[in-house]
Amino acid sequence: MFLRRPGRTSIKGSARKEKKHKYTQYDYNKKLAVINSYQETGDMRATLTKVFGDISTLHHESKRKLVHRWE
């Protein structure tokens, strides 16, 4: 005999959504390295390019704000 789970059934097929893992966590050593690099050069664009590589304009603005929150 087929036993059903109690509760309302999902109409889309899967009840749970996949995790997106949008936020990347950085350890204190990396944060300190980024802050020190920014203080040495005084140029945020150069610091972000050095640490995070070549990122898009949208991501550049987000990372810039993130680094300023670390200070």
Image: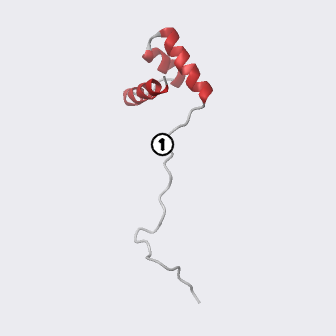
In the image, what residue occupies the spot 53% across and 37% down? 24
Q: Is residue 4 above or below residue 60?
A: below
- For the N terminus, the quadrant is bottom right
Q: Nearer the viewer, residue 52 or 36?
A: 36
For label 1, the residue is 22
SS for dot 1: loop
Q: Position of residue 13 (x, y in %)?
A: 45, 69
Q: Residue 12, image x and y in percent?
A: 41, 68
| Snapshot quadrant of residue 62 | top left
Depicted 28 relative to depicted 16: above or below: above
Residue found farthest to the top: 41
Q: Is residue 47 above or below residue 55?
A: above
Decide if residue 70 is on the left or right side of residue 62: right
> Which percent across, then down, holds residue 26?
57, 32
Q: Is 60 displayed left or right of 28 in the figure?
A: left
Residue 20 locus on image (x, y percent): 48, 48
Q: Residues within 10 Å of mark 1 (few under 14, many from 20)?
A: few
Left or right: residue 32 versus residue 10 is right
